């Protein structure tokens, strides 16, 4: 995977967009060629995003056209599956109050999924499964979180084809708005 940073995520987002378009969803993305669905996907707190209120920028959001709600938020760490990085992505998003895209807030479905994946291999799987379980138990105690997620998932992928397959499986298994 010798692609420039963000290119892998852009390529996968484009293929996901084709796949989900016929199912009634738009795939918003932060990388790749300019389009109506490309822009920063910002998780923030307060009234408007700014350097002081921005908590995270996500790579992909799957937006259901009929409900006009985000049903899945995705962050792809192309370079590694370091626990510190993955957990930072998860908790920065969980602590956010809003998602901003192209000048407006987007509503997040109460059953939405947050998927955070990093490049790794089978040797990382036990650690990732442990992190996934720990996040679930901590998340249940976050009663004051404004954005509720039906599911938060952490996982690893080894190559581009595996990333697309992994994301489709996770999104299809949990997609409901």
Image: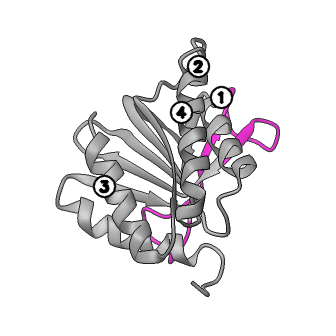
Q: As displayed, is residue 5 above or below residue 154?
A: below
Q: Secondary structure at mark 1?
A: loop
Label 3 crowd (10 A; few <14 / some 14-19 / many >=20): few
Q: Residues within 10 Å of mark 1 (few under 14, many from 20)?
A: some
Q: Which residue is mark 1?
A: 95
Disc 4/disc 2 C-alpha distance (Å): 19 Å
Residue at the spot of label 4: 133
The segment highlighted magenta reads 31-56
Location of mark 2 (residue): 145
Q: Which mark is residue 149?
A: none
**Percent x, y for residue 66?**
22, 41
Q: Earlier in the sequence, mark 4 or mark 3?
A: 4
Location of residue 135 with respect to 70 vertically, above or below: above
Prevailing secondary structure of the magenta residues: loop
Q: CA distance from mark 4 to mark 3?
A: 19 Å
Identify the residue at horizontal 71%, vertical 40% (top origin).
55
**Earlier-in-chain disc, 1 versus 3:** 1
Does any portion of residue 117 appear in the rendered image? no
Q: Which residue is mark 3?
A: 169
Identified at 34% across, 72% down, the residue is 15
């Amino acid at each position: 995977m010798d692609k420039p940073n963000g290119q892998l995520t852009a390529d996968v987002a484009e293929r996901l967009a084709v796949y989900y378009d016929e199912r009634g969803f738009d795939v918003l993305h932060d990388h790749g060629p300019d389009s109506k669905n490309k822009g920063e996907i910002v998780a923030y707190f307060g009234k408007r995003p700014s350097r002081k209120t921005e908590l995270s920028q996500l790579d992909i959001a799957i937006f259901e056209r009929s409900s006009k709600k985000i049903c899945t938020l995705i962050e792809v760490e192309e370079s590694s599956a370091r626990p510190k990085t993955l957990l930072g992505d998860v908790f920065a998003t969980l602590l956010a109050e809003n998602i901003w895209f192209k000048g407006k807030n987007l509503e997040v479905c109460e059953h939405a999924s947050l998927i955070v994946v990093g490049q790794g291999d089978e040797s990382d799987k036990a650690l990732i499964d442990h992190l996934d379980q720990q996040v679930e138990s901590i998340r249940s105690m976050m009663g004051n979180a404004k954005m509720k997620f039906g599911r938060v998932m952490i996982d690893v992928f080894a190559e581009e084809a595996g990333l697309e397959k992994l994301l489709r499986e996770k999104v299809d298994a949990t997609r409901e708005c």
